[in-house]
Image (cartoon, helix red, strand yellow):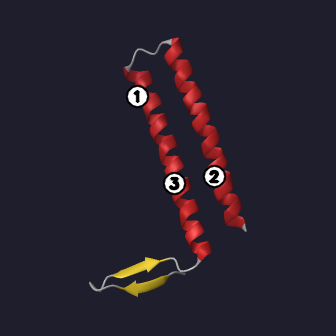
Amino acid sequence: MSNVELQGDSSPKSSPSTLPEKQENTRGWLAKGTFLLFAIVIVGILLSAVFANLTPDRLNFLLSVLSAITGTLGFVMGFYFGQNQK
């Protein structure tokens, strides 16, 4: 549970009070950001496949980018859920 502090405008502001809570929030944001990046790349690849003239060179480039981002996403998700278990 996080602490709730009342500010001057009487709206509750929650903030993590301990280091583990802050680390968990940071891990969560990194995982969400990486997943968002992955989704944007997937949408970009699908749009370019539909609307652009997809040459073999472009296809190889898109597959290379997709492979790199997929590996990164797997690493980040594994780290996030691995740390979440402890």
Residue 69 x, y percent position in the rendering: 58, 38
Of the numbered discs in the image, which one, if any, rests on residue 47? 1
- Number of numbered markers: 3
Name the image quarter holding residue 11: bottom left
Amino acid type, mark 3: Lys
Residue 10 x, y percent position in the rendering: 29, 86
Above or below residue 57? Residue 81 is: below
Amino acid type, mark 1: Leu
User: Residue drawn at (71%, 59%), measured in percent from left and top?
Assistant: 82
Figure quadrant of the N terminus: bottom right
Separation (CA) of disc 3 from disc 1: 22 Å
Separation (CA) of disc 2 from disc 1: 26 Å
Residue 21 x, y percent position in the rendering: 58, 73
Question: Element type at marker 3?
Answer: helix
Label 3: few (<14), some or many (≥20) within 10 Å?
some
Residue placed under numbered mark 2 in the picture: 77
